[in-house]
Amino acid sequence: MASHDAHAHGHHEDHHHHEEHFISKYIFSQDHKMIGKQFLMTAVFMGLVAMMLSILFRIQLAWPGESSDFLSFFLGEKWAPNGVLKEDMYLGLVTIHGTIMVFFLLTGGLSGTFSNILIPLQLGARDMASGFLNMLSYWMFALSSIIMLISLFVESGPAMAGWTVYPPLSALPQAVSGSGLGMTLWLVSMTIFIASSLIGSLNYIVTIINLRTQGMTMTRMPLTIWAFFVTAILGVLSFPVLLSAALLLTMDRLMGTSFYLSDIIVGGEMLTNHGGSPILYQHLFWFLGHPEVYIVLLPALGLSSEIIATNSRKPIFGYKAMIGSILAIGFLSFIVWGHHMFVTGMNPFLGSVFVFTTLLIAIPSAVKVFNYITTLWKGSLVLTPAMLFAIGLVSTFITGGVTGIILADSALDIMLHDTYFVVAHFHIVMGMSAVFGMFAGVYHWFPKMFGRMMNTRLGYAHFWVTLIGAYGVFFPMHFVGLAGAPRRYYDYSSYSEFDNNSFELMMDLNQIITVFAILAALGQVIFLFNFFYSIFRGPKAPQNPWNSTTLEWTTPVEAIHGNWPGDLPTVHRWPYDYSKPGASVDFITQITPLEEGEEEH
Amino acid sequence: MENKLIILLVIVLGAIAIAQLVRIYEISAKLRKTGEHEISSRDNNLNGRMMFIFMFLLFGFFIYLTQAYGWTGRGTAASDEGVEMDWLLNLNFVIIIAIFFFTNFLLFYFTWKYVKKPGVPAYYYPHNNKLELIWTIVPAVVLAVIIILGLQTWGHLSGPSKPEAEKIELFSKQFDWTARYAGADNTLGLYDYKLTLDNNELALLTSNTIDSALNNMFNSSTGIRSLQKLLNNRDTIFSDSTLNVLKMDLSRKERLYRFLTQMKQHHNPKLDASAWDDIIQKDTLYLCKGQEYEIALRAKDVIHSAYFPHFRAQMNTVPGMATRMKFTPNMTTKEMRREKNDENFNYILMCNKICGGAHYKMKMIVVVLDKSAYKKWMDGKKKATFKDQYFPVAAAPAPAAPADTTAVTMN
């Protein structure tokens, strides 16, 4: 459709039509809407790869040692001889699955996509503060994604030290084959990813502070923007620390320094490194790693706030408290990283401090949950697919959040640390919640992104399969963990040698989990089809399909450069005037001036 | 090959099936003549009801799982510390399960109850400070209780052990465990990783082991002397890369040799005794019921984690850093077998920190004996101390060959 424009108007300086060359419109675009879509497409692809990897290792866990054509089809003779997954590749799959999901899908995909699309549109800006940096941010993200994918194909295998890549394992190629070239590529990819994330975040912050339209005070911003704002600040403050951790690791690997290495004999070779501390890496890593959880989660919570308010036809309950809790969560997320390290040999007193700060986070989280629930109360709920996913998010946020209370308790963490209980916990609270938030966002803002509607019925089918599949995967996982199963184990058959009850429990549950995982993965095909089909063939979207109050729905359906054809809109009220008493319709857009004698909420 | 084709075929057919599905939906949507953004009240009610039904399924699934697998699938805790922890875990579980049921119920119930009904407007209710105060303070109070109880237990678990605790060291490497009992003096001998040799795998520090390490570093077939000989041999020509590797190897070994020499100069021979009487034990770790253990942890290559699921004890082993833990077993293996009704049951020590390909195989059987059986076992072991293993002839310790110190000056 676009190609004829590209040829006809390729190099014209035509101010009336704004026709652009194919390359500058679709590839090296500086338009925030296009960049957002590029982030989304890349992230969807990366997410698919990571999901696929998880299915591969789930097959091994459910039917250990059994030959599977599925495995040999995807991994070939080298990594799955006779259809049985190799031990090393199992670790490689787990590592890359985690890395892609956390960074490339949930950080790049969620914050990258929706910050880009929504920040200018909801603030009334023509574009991001710097379109060029924004473009650079996407292309660095794309480059890092490609490098990460390439690392799956190198001869010695991808990084295999778990997504946290703790040294010394990740520093010593003698210890595991993936710590050779695979690990180098991992570090290169992540370094570029961090640069991309930093540029993006700085851009978001500057745009939010400087480019709000007239009348758009900070306390009239939708909660989505608040969430993106705090997320960007967290990213700017924490990602550089991960970069420093990665740099020191690179130096240990390549230049013989001893930041993380001390007194090691590996592969029969006595190393001379002395005085380093692997714990230092863990401190640096988790100083990013914990805020990262909220970098992933806050945008999802922001999106769902908006979607729940719109589809409840009610203002979000406790707008100020919601902002307060976002800020509180953002602040606290920086002083809790030690709860990942209770059993690493960290000073027990320091551990107690982290217990205290970590459990404090439960308070703003509880406030958010109750505010969502109260927003639903006495609402007039329109259950669009986006709304269902947003409600699903609240449910998983609760279910995954409460087990966090147990893991934050250092005394209980001793027995649950690094077991499947942890895996279940963070997959529900971070994985499921963020993915649900992302799906909710895609269904809700699809009309804004592509000017067309997605199929609602398929959306419902997708939601139900995903909800049931995902709970089916991660709910039983708690019980595997409570039975004591360590994570990152290739095979639990050895339990039969010493504890038959636990062995049978684990085998049972692992099969249930894998079946649900396959079901949930197949469910995503419905989404993919709906998504791509609707981009080209979906029915045309009306300007404001969900009867929403925020600014993005005042722009024309056909996305244009600069977002608004004439002057930028002026904002007169907060974004949550739904079902306001005395109004003739159940929503009043932000650009509607206050009536005579009307009070702002 | 055939199966691969079938897999490919299934994928393709699946895609086609979905394509057909979409076409049907597309046609049905055209027939309905409403936009995708207009949710019919039929769809609305159906999904609302399904959400409520889903809640019961979720709760039912949870209750089923607790009934079928129990919420601590490891069964009874087998240590004093574990009993205390299990009590705290159960208390926490009661609290979080109550929250889980309560909030999920409200969420799904409201979703069903307040689904859009024609003519019923939503209730404009932007905020209520009192309510918000309540759900800030109530969680804060509950958390205060959790924090106080948790930290008390943490204090007990991570605090120092009693002086009479028996000392054991657990040594981890890819991919097995070795235990070292402190012997008659209940003092673990010192160690230094540079002393590692085939006959001193745990690198214990004695005058003899320093000497043999020095000797080995200099005289062994890959030692400094043969490397120097190799590099000085004018008849052989190496490629640049090989030459580089050899030179690096030589300089590494010379550095280690220098450290060992310094160690020898500063070594206090009085310390030897505490190492000689240590007892090194592979394969199975024997413990005594009711005896508190102070466990020192050590790693040779990468981080491992000593994890005793049944004693509810865990601590990482970190290269270059000493870590510790303590626990008191309170049930013998026999008693636990009876309790579990499983004749083949055994306690286990597992590795619980990713450490390489065979991580999942890295374990050690643990046997808890009663006092008399343990004493009997220990008495037998005291005849096979580190000293007895180091000098297998059972003769008096022969002084190790003095290292060739004059050769060093050559460098």
Image: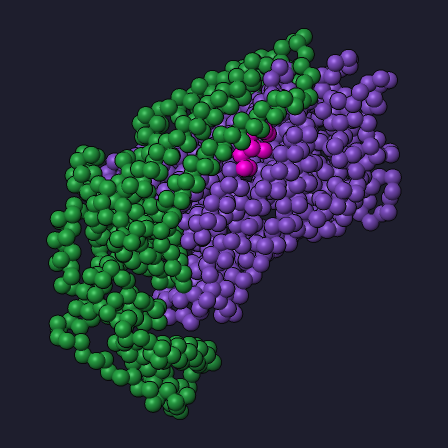
- Does residue B275 belong to the magenta stretch? no
Up/down of B20 relative to A253, above or below? above
Describe the colour scheme in one phrase. Answer: by chain
Viewer-proximal residue among B79 and A136 = B79
Quarter of the view holding residue A210: top right
Q: Quadrant of the N terminus of chain B?
A: top left
* Residue A515 rendering spot, x and y as whole percentages: 39, 33
Quarter of the view holding residue B194: bottom left
Residue B382 horizontal side relative to residue A252, left or right: left
Viewer-proximal residue among B241 and B347 = B347
Work out which residue is located at the far front of the displayed protein and give it: B163
Q: Which chain is green?
A: B
Work out which residue is located at the far top of the displayed protein and give it: B119
* Label tally: 0
The boundaries of the magenta stretch are: A360-368
Q: Is residue B9 visible?
A: no
Q: Main secondary structure of the magenta part?
A: helix
Residue A465 horizontal side relative to residue A213, left or right: left
**Residue at 64% over, 50% down:** A237
Which tint is chain A?
purple
Up/down of B101 relative to A356, above or below? above
**Residue at 16% over, 47% down:** B371
Viewer-proximal residue among A284 and A162 = A284
**Residue at 51% over, 53% down:** A283
Q: Is residue A361 visible?
A: yes
* Residue A216 rendering spot, x and y as whole percentages: 79, 33
* Residue A110 rendering spot, x and y as whole percentages: 61, 39
* Residue B245 rendering spot, x and y as whole percentages: 43, 77
Q: Quadrant of the C terminus of chain B?
A: bottom left
Residue A27 horizontal side relative to residue B81, left or right: right
Up/down of A51 relative to A255, above or below? above
**Residue at 27% over, 56% down:** B167
